[in-house]
Image: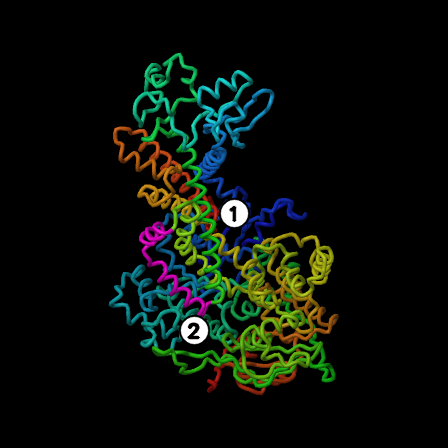
Amino acid sequence: MTALTGTPSGMAAPQTGRLSPVARRRWENFKANRRGFWSLWIFLALFGISLCAEFIANDRPILVSYKGELLVPVLVNYPEETFGGFLAETDYASDFIREEIEANGWMVWPPIRYSYRSANSNIPHSAPTAPFWTMSATERCSGYPQGEADRGCTLGNFNWLGTDDQARDVAARTIYGFRISVLFGLALTIASAIVGVTAGAIQGYFGGWTDLLMQRFIEIWSSMPVLYILLIIAAILPPGFFVLLGIMLLFSWVGFVGVVRAEFLRARNFEYVRAARALGVGNATIMWRHLLPNAMVATLTFLPFILSGSITTLTSLDFLGFGMPPGSPSLGELIAQGKSNLQAPWLGLTAFLVMSIMLSLLIFIGEAARDAFDPRKTFG
Amino acid sequence: MTEPLLSVRDLSVAFHQGGKTSLAVDRVSFDIAKGEVVALVGESGSGKSVSANSILKLLPYPAASHPSGQILFNGRDLLTIDDAELRAVRGNDITMIFQEPMTSLNPLHSIERQIAEILDLHQGIKPAQARPRVLELLSQVGIREPEKRLKAYPHELSGGQRQRVMIAMALANRPELLIADEPTTALDVTVQAQILELLKQLKDAHGMSMLFITHDLGIVRKIADRVCVMTKGRIVETGPTAEIFGNPQHAYTRHLLASEPRGTPPTTDETKPIVIEATDMKVWFPIKAGFLRKTVDHVKAVDGIDLTLRAGQTLGVVGESGSGKTTLGLALTRLIGSQGRIGFEGQNIESYSFSQMRPLRRRMQIVFQDPFGSLSPRMAVSDIIGEGLKVHEPSLSARERDARVAAALEEVGLDAATRWRYPHEFSGGQRQRIAIARAMVLKPQFVMLDEPTSALDMSVQAQVVDLLRDLQARHGLAYLFISHDLKVVRALANDMIVMRLGKVVEKGPAETIFTAPREDYTKALMAAAFDLEAVPVPAVRQ
C-alpha cells in the first residue's frame, strides 16, 4: 500500500543537502529519543571543552605583554632569560617572574593555573589536600608565605577538586584525563572499525575457503589471553599512547567481524549486487558502493558501545598500572590513588563521577543510534 | 437473495505515519451471499488486500484505523466486537489463506502440529486425538500419502504442497467464509491450476463462501460468481462475472481488460548475424556428503542445452520454477560457471576470466525480475544508471555522463528530471524502466531479460512489453527472454525453448509451439496458462 502514501514533496530538484531520505528519517528518529539527543550534545560540549584543555588548565598564561611585546606562552615555550632569569623553561607561577612581568606589562591566566603535571607548591598541609571550598580562607592560604595577604592566594590558584598525593591539581588532571580517554577510545574504535569491517567484508563477500580460514584464525586469535600479552609487551616496549593503542587494536577489531560478515553474506546475493556484477563493476567497487552501506548500519549501531568499552579498558589498565606512562593524566590512575588514599574521598569520587557520567552519556547516545537505525521503528 | 453472509458497508481504512494520514480504502461496500465466490480485483496499491485484512482486523492497529464503515457477518459488526469474540471468529467462521505459502507457515513446527493447533483452539480437540481429522484434511486437499507427510516441516514441501497445507488449515473448522488473498500468485502455472481446481471443489463440497483477492483476470473469470473492481481505494464497478467481462461499464475496468500483453514478436530471420550461441551447456552443482565432503551426485540445473540467438531476435525460455531457466541465463552471461562452449560475437568466452569479460559486459546486459531488489536503495537513479558508464567509458566527463543518463531515461519513457530521486520514490513499473535504462545506456547487443514483467501489474506489464519490443526494433537487440508467463512470451519471442528440470523439453519457432505443442509437458503448461486447466503432467526421468 505504499503507492498510496505518495512521494515526499520537494524532491524534484537535485538535492542540496547530502542527506538521503533514509538518512533524514534516521536523524528524525535519533532526535525523537530526547535523552540520547541531549546526551550527544552534552558529550560533544564536554569533549570540545576538553580538547581546549591547554587554555583552561595550564601552568602558563595564555597571553603575556612584556615590555611592549605580545607573547603566547600557552603555545610557545619561552626560556626564562626572556624575562631576565636563567632557567630553560619559565615558571610563570614563581614570584620573581610574576613580579617582573607585572612590572613591565600584564598577563592573562587560564581559569585553572595548573597543568596536569604541575604541582601546587603552596599547599596548606601535606598532599593530598581537599578542595578549597571545604577549607576556611585562612586555612587555604596558609601555604603561602604571607598567608591571606599573599597575592598568590587567588581563585585561579585554588584547587577546585583538591590535589592528589603528589600535590597535582585534580581538576586539571580530570580535564586532561577525560580528553586522553576519549581520544584513545575514538582512535581505538575507528582503527578497529576499519580493520574489522575490512576483514568482515572480505570474509562475507568472498565466502568459501577465505571465510573458513579467516573464521578459524579469528577463533584462535580471540582466545589469546590479552592481559598476559599486554604484560609481556609492556616489559619489552615502553608503554605509551600508541603502543597501548596498537596492542589493544590487535584484539579489539574482532568484535566487528561478525556483524559485517553476516551483512555481506546476506547482501552479496542481492539482485542489485548481481546487476552491478553484470555491468562489469569490480569487486572492490561493489563492496564499497553497494555492500558497505548495508553493513554500516550494524557498524554504526555498534560504535558507541565499542567506544565506551575502549575507554573502560584503558581506565582499567591504568588502574592496574599497565597503562599510560607514569605522570600522564589518567582517570584510571586517579581511581588507583583514590583507592590508596581513602582519607581523601575527593579523589575516588571525582574519578567515579567523571567515568560514570562519560560512560552513561555514551550508552545513551548508543541507544538513540540503535533506535535511529531500527527500520521497524516507524510509528514512533 | 436472502440476507448476505458478509456485508461490508462504507468501509474506509486510513494509515497514519509520521503525522501524515493516507486513506487506503475509501468507503467500500460489497456483499457475499452464502456459497458465493466474490472476487476483489485490482492492481497493487488499489486497497484490495487492506480491505480483506480489515474484515478480520488484521491490520497494524493503531497505525491503521477505520474512519467509517461496518462489517456485518451474520448480523454482527466485526469492527466493534471485542478481541475475544473476534478471535473466536478468526480461523473458525472466517479463515484466510495468504499469498506466500513459504512465510505463512511456521518453519519450526511440523504440519501436523500446525493443523492440530487450529483444531485445538476452536474445537478443543486435543492434539493426541486430532490425527484422524488432520489426515482427513490433508487427503481432502490432495496431499498424497498424508501419513508420511504428518511429520514434515514446511521446507520439505513444495510451494504447491505448502499452499495445500494452508488450505487444509483454513478448512479445518469448516468455515463459512474463506478469504483467499492472492493464493496462487507465488505458484507455477500448473500448480496454480491445480489449486484453483481444489478450491472450487472444496467450495462446492462444503458450501462455503469465498472472497478471492487477485490481480489476475484469468483467475477471476474462472472462479468468481461476482466481481468487484477496485482502484485507488474505491470499488468502481460491481457485477456478475459474465457481465463485467462481456460489458464493462467503467473506464478502468475496460482499461484492465484491455491490458493483456499485445503485439507480435519480431520475424525470424536466419540471415542476421549470430550474437550468442551455446553448445551442450551444463551447470552442475555438486552434492557433497560424508566427512570428507566427497561429491556423491550433482544437481543438474542446466543439463546439455544448445541455443543460438541472432541480432534483432528474441529467444523465449519458458519453464516452471526450478527448471533452470534463470541458471541458464546467468551461465550464458558468465555470472556463474558452466561447461560447454559459449560463443559471443564470434569469440569463445566460456573460459574468460572476470577481467577478460569486463570489456564484453557492456555489450551483454541483464534486466532482473524484481525491480525492488535490483536497484540499490541507497543510490540516486542517476548514479545507478551512470555506474556502468563509469566502468566502461571512464573518459566521459561528468557532464557527458549526465547527458547519457538523461537520454537513457527519456528513451525508456521516464522524465529525465527524475534522475536525482531514489528508487523508493518510483512505482514498480517505473523501477523496471530504470533497470532497463541501466542496461540500455551502455548500448548492448544482447540483453538477458530474467522475468522482467513478473513482478509488475497487468497493465504495466503490457507497457513494459511494448517498450522492450520498441527498443529491440530500434537498436536491433538480441533478447534472451526468460519467463514463466506464456502470454508475455507469446507477445515477445519468435523462438522458444521449453525447459524442465534443466533439460529442453521442446524447442522451435514460438508460434509453432503455441499453436501445436508436441510434448505432453508443453501441452499441460499451455492448458494451465491459458485455460487454467489442471492437466496431469507425466513425470520425466532424468
B244 left or right of B393 in image = left
Are the residues under marks 1 and 2 on the same chain?
yes
Near-viewer residue (A186 or B43): A186
* Dots 1, 2 in contact, CB < 8 A: no
Q: Which residues are magenta?
A: A207-236
Q: Main secondary structure of the magenta part?
A: helix
Percent coordinates x, y for residue A64 in the rendering: 54, 23
Q: Secondary structure at mark 1?
A: strand
Residue A204 counted in the magenta span: no
**Among numbered discs 1 and 2, the one appearing first in the sequence:** 1
- Kindly identify which residue carries mark 2: B158
Under mark 2, the amino acid is Ser
B464 w.r.t. B27: above or below = below
- On the image, the x and y values in percent for residue B320 come to 52, 76
Dot 2: element: loop
Q: Quadrant of residue A137?
A: top left
Residue A361 in the figure: left or right of residue B38: left
Q: Position of residue A379 (x, y in %)?
A: 47, 46
